[in-house]
Image (cartoon, rainbow, N blue to C red):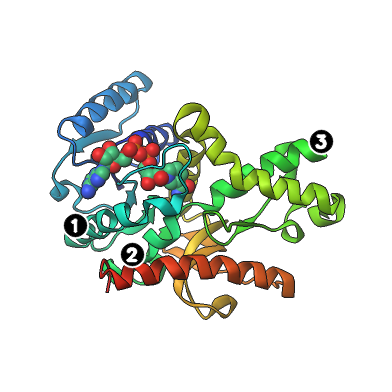
């Protein structure tokens, strides 16, 4: 199993670290535009693998040819937000980067599954899908898992129950309009919407939306939580686990929406997104979800107008 990671910065290098720890590949290729960076990361990671006695080999490269034959390609290339920025502020910078990276993936790894991480992630997933012309199950955006992990953490604290007892779900955009959905989040066997007051639910939602910005303000970037989610996604693909995970998927009529990528629960296996789960949203929830779709649609339209994508 060969897995490639495009962008060897904070997320790229630590994704490779976690793939090694979970033993999900025989070969990992790290690519970056910066000369020497992926090569240096690869040396460091190989020495770690050696210490652990693991037969996983990391290659660092500035040449896309080295990703040839990859089963999974993770895209972390681009710019990350700085304190005070929203993910959408990265739109015009990262869209051409993700488009060009995708062209290289098509050239050298045309049978791969692409996991898009670069922000604004839902829009970048759409850029990768449209550029690659891959079937929609083979282009997956990672973001909802992370938002859901954060929501779970907050709910666990509020309810005074362990993290593992809470199943939390965030759907919609991985961005300002994300939708933590208490009626489909559970503590044990009870819906969170039945356990917390409206005021507390609102507080949990607000915290979930803002918590990444808090981390960025404190330490400059979010790293460990996202790379754990990326690797869980990879694990479900390479082990064909059929995990039910919130991912950004191309919608073609599901939830009454078409032609955009947005966070929804899906079954993830060897073929990538194997099934999109349609939750039975009530009227108010549907309005919230549609609002999130509108934000992503607006950004896609902007890229179409600018002719970044066709
Ligand atoms: P970083 O700045 O540490 O790394 C990005 C790397 O991409 C750099 O090494 C840069 O040289 C490289 N790069 C830029 N253009 C490239 C190109 N054309 N080809 C190959 N490599 C290129 O950033 P970090 O912290 O690793 O974040 C990466 C992206 O992931 C950002 O857009 C960030 O906003 C996003 N992100 C997404 C999350 C999610 O849940 N979806 C969570 C956290 C970050």
Q: CA distance from mark 1 to mark 2?
A: 14 Å
Q: Position of residue 100 (x, y in %)?
A: 21, 58
- Residue found farthest to the top: 51
Image position, residue 14 (x, y; %): 38, 33
* Nearer to the camera, 274 or 104: 104
Residue at 51% in and 32% down: 217
Mark closer to the chain start, 2 or 3: 2
Residue 160 in the image: state x and y as whole percent.
81, 35
Sequence-wise, the earlier of marks 1 and 3 is 1
| Nearer to me, 79 or 1 | 79
From the image, which quarter does the C terminus lie in?
A: bottom left
Q: Which residue is mark 2?
A: 127
**Ligand 1 sits in which quadrant?**
top left
Total count of labels: 3
Quarter of the image for residue 231 reads top left
Whether residue 34 is visible here, answered yes or no, is: yes
Q: Is residue 101 above or below residue 5?
A: below
Label 2 packing within 10 angstroms: few (<14), some (14-19), many (20+): many
Where does residue 118 sit, x and y in percent of width and height? 37, 50
Q: Are marks 2 and 3 in contact (CB under 8 Å)?
A: no
Which SS class for mark 1? helix
Q: Which mark is residue 160?
A: 3
Please give the name of the residue rendered at 30% of the width and 27% of the height, measured from the top-left corner. Answer: 45
Residue 243: in sight, yes or no?
Answer: no
Disc on res. 104: 1
């Amino acid at each position: 199993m060969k897995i490639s990671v495009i962008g060897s910065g904070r997320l790229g290098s630590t994704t490779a670290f976690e793939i090694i720890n979970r033993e999900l590949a025989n070969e990992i290729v790290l690519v970056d535009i910066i000369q020497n960076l992926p090569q240096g990361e690869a040396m460091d990671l190989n020495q770690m693998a050696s210490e652990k006695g693991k037969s996983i080999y990391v290659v660092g490269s500035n040449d896309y040819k080295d990703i040839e034959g990859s089963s999974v390609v993770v895209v972390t290339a681009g710019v990350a937000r700085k304190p005070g920025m929203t993910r959408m502020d990265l739109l015009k910078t990262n869209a051409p980067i993700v488009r060009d990276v995708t062209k290289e993936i098509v050239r050298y790894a045309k049978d791969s599954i692409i996991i898009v991480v670069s922000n604004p992630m839902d829009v970048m997933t759409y850029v990768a899908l449209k550029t690659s012309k891959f079937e929609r199950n083979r282009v997956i955006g990672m973001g909802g898992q992370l938002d859901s992990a954060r929501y779970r953490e907050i709910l666990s604290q509020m309810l005074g129950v362990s993290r593992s007892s809470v199943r939390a779900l965030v759907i919609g955009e991985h961005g300002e309009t994300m939708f933590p959905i208490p009626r489909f989040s559970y503590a044990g066997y009870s819906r969170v919407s039945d356990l917390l007051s409206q005021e507390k639910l609102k507080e949990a939602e607000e915290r979930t939306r803002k918590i990444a910005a808090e981390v960025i303000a404190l330490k400059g970037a979010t790293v460990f939580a996202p790379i754990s989610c990326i690797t869980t996604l990879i694990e479900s693909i390479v082990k064909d686990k059929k995990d039910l995970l919130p991912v950004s998927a191309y919608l073609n009529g599901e939830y009454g929406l078409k032609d955009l990528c947005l966070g929804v629960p899906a079954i993830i296996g060897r073929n990538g997104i194997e099934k999109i789960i349609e939750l039975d949203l009530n009227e108010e929830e549907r309005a919230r979800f549609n609002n999130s779709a509108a934000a992503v649609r607006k950004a896609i339209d902007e890229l179409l107008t600018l002719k970044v994508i066709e």
